[in-house]
Image: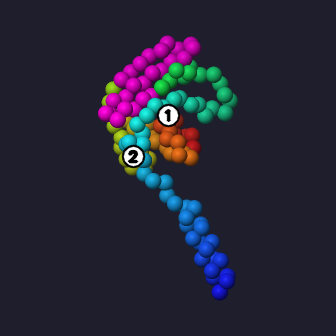
Amino acid sequence: MRAVLCRSLLACCVLAGCTAQPPVTRDALVGTYVYKSEDPEGKPTDHEWDRLTLQADGKYDLVQGGPTKPKSEKTGLWHFSGGDPAEVDLDHSGYPVRVKRGEVRLMIDCRIP
């Protein structure tokens, strides 16, 4: 009887730890994003000033540039497409959405886990 109770308790703990990630919502994506390179070599980039702001009203503001790259700013409309993977579209460019450890990421290169 004790072995059955232990197995049942273990099964409940395993199932509780394997809950699925809730789907990404449009509201969760509203905010400001910064460019972060996952390059293992740590090379300097021209993305020091890169910032993307997704506004609740469907507009976005993208600032790009760095010490050796002129600063530019682009504004437009963004759209959210749910699904697997969810995607954010800036005008006509799409970026897959990843949620990792509670952090929302818009991916430029999908080969990064």
The answer to which of marks 2 and 1 sits earlier in the sequence is 2
Label 2 to label 1: alpha-carbon separation: 19 Å
Residue 14, x across and y down, in percent: 59, 66
Q: Amino acid at mark 1?
A: Ile
Residue beneath the point at 66% across and 28% down: 42
Would you call the spot at circle 2 few (<14 residues within 10 Å), some (14-19), or many (20 or more)? few
- Tell whether position 57 is magenta: yes
Out of 59 and 107, give the one closest to the viewer. 59
Residue at the disc numbered 2: 25
Residue 92 appears in the figure: no
Out of 83 and 35, give the one closest to the viewer. 35
Q: Quadrant of residue 77?
A: top left
Residue farthest bottom in this picture: 1
Q: Secondary structure at mark 2?
A: loop
Residue beneath the point at 39% across and 46% down: 25
Q: Is residue 42 above or below residue 103?
A: above
